[in-house]
Amino acid sequence: MQTTRGGEYMQIRLNGKDYPLAEQTKTLHDLIQQLNIDEEVVIIEQNHQIIDRSRYMDTNVQSGDVVEIVHFVGGG
Amino acid sequence: MLEIGGKTFASRLLLGTGKYPDAETQQQAVEASETNILTFSVRRLDVFAKEQTNPLAALDLSRYDLLPNTAGAKTAEEAVRLARLARASGMCDMVKVEVIGCDKTLLPDPIETLRAAEELIKDGFIVLPYTSDDLLLARRLEELGCHAIMPAASPIGSGQGILNPLALSFIIEQMTVPVIVDAGIGSPADAAYAMELGADGVLLNSAVAHATDPVKMAQAMKLAVEAGRLGFEAGRIEKKRYATASSPTTGISRP
């Protein structure tokens, strides 16, 4: 659900698409929860910086952030 | 034993994890190959899907050394980024540098490959570049500190086998780091041939994944790599123009 903070729409660029942040989504950990994904199998880059898995809880997500969530797939 | 960047591997077959008909076949083929090293790629998770699927879920990755590739990269910068994303998984410190310069042939861009390799070596990776069969490029990559050189036998996924054994053998003879023939292998004969040329290993994916029976082909490739290696170590006979009898030419009994 689209939310505002201080009158501003909270939206990030997630894997190349605009994505609205839920009101309770404050950190990368929250974002993972919102997306319902298994954090053990993903790697996250925020604004071109790889974020260490141990820091998801205390890394804030802000409107306008560019977030890439990747994982391993089959390849040769 | 195959030795890369201080690690040793009993198997000289490196196997890709892409393009199998299903997860179960992939898992059984990996098992049958008895490989120690699996390659895979880094891609966006489909975060917008209702449920995410893990394409490697059937594999117990803890049993293998993982060799992520930088497939998808067209520049050194893109390759370095993909390598760092892969390493951030905490599951690997090796990387197959793959920087494609031509979409039709999937041939590697030599300049970008060299630049990416240099950066990743500085960054502490164990670097295995996918390269063409150019000896001088291989030398440059080795001089940079690459831990293995992986020349193509023929274009990726083409199954054309070894098109230029002479060029490959020049590389094999001159490198001190392992040479792993990567890409283009189509049949067990190709894999055995690569090993007979003296390659330290073979990396393949399509030849197994797209075979009619991938599991059986994985076993065939395992045996081919072993046979080729044994043949290389045993030292083949010289080719001669005319026949040489295998049986004694004297003492022939006649009625």
Image: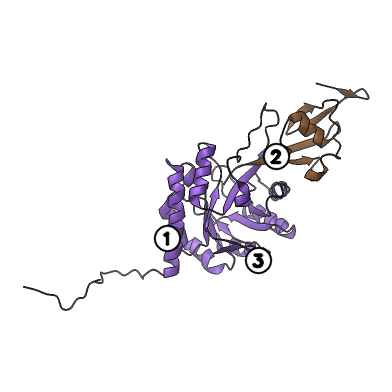
Chain colours: A brown, B purple
Residue B178 x, y percent position in the rendering: 57, 63
Q: Quadrant of residue B8?
A: bottom right
Question: Please, what is the three-letter code of the amino acid marked with disc 3?
Answer: Glu
Residue B85 x, y percent position in the rendering: 72, 46
**Vertical arrangement, residue A14 with respect to residue B145, above or below:** above
- Distance Cα–Cα, label 2 vs label 1: 39 Å
Are discs 2 and 1 both within one chain?
no
Residue marked by disc 3 = B143
- The C terminus of chain B, quarter of image: bottom left
- Which residue corresponds to the image point at 79% horizontal and 32% vertical from the top-left? A31
- The N terminus of chain B, quarter of image: bottom right
Q: Which type of secondary structure does the marked residue at label 3 adopt?
A: helix
Name the front one of labels 3 and 1: 1
- Distance Cα–Cα, label 2 vs label 3: 33 Å
Q: Earlier in the sequence, mark 3 or mark 1?
A: 3
Residue marked by disc 2 = A70
- Distance Cα–Cα, label 3 vs label 1: 31 Å
**Residue at mark 2: chain:** A
Tally of numbered discs: 3
- Which residue corresponds to the image point at 50% horizontal and 40% vertical from the top-left? B25
Residue marked by disc 1 = B227
Could one spot residue B93 in this view of the protein?
yes
Could one spot residue B98 in this view of the protein?
no
Q: Please say if the residues under marks 2 and 1 sit with CB atoms less than 8 Å apart.
A: no
View extreme (bottom): residue:
B250
Q: Which type of secondary structure does the marked residue at label 2 adopt?
A: strand
- Which residue corresponds to the image point at 62% horizontal and 47% vertical from the top-left? B61
- Which residue corresponds to the image point at 63% horizontal and 37% vertical from the top-left? B54
Question: Please, what is the three-letter code of the amino acid marked with disc 2?
Answer: Val
Q: Please say if the residues under marks 3 and 1 sit with CB atoms less than 8 Å apart.
A: no
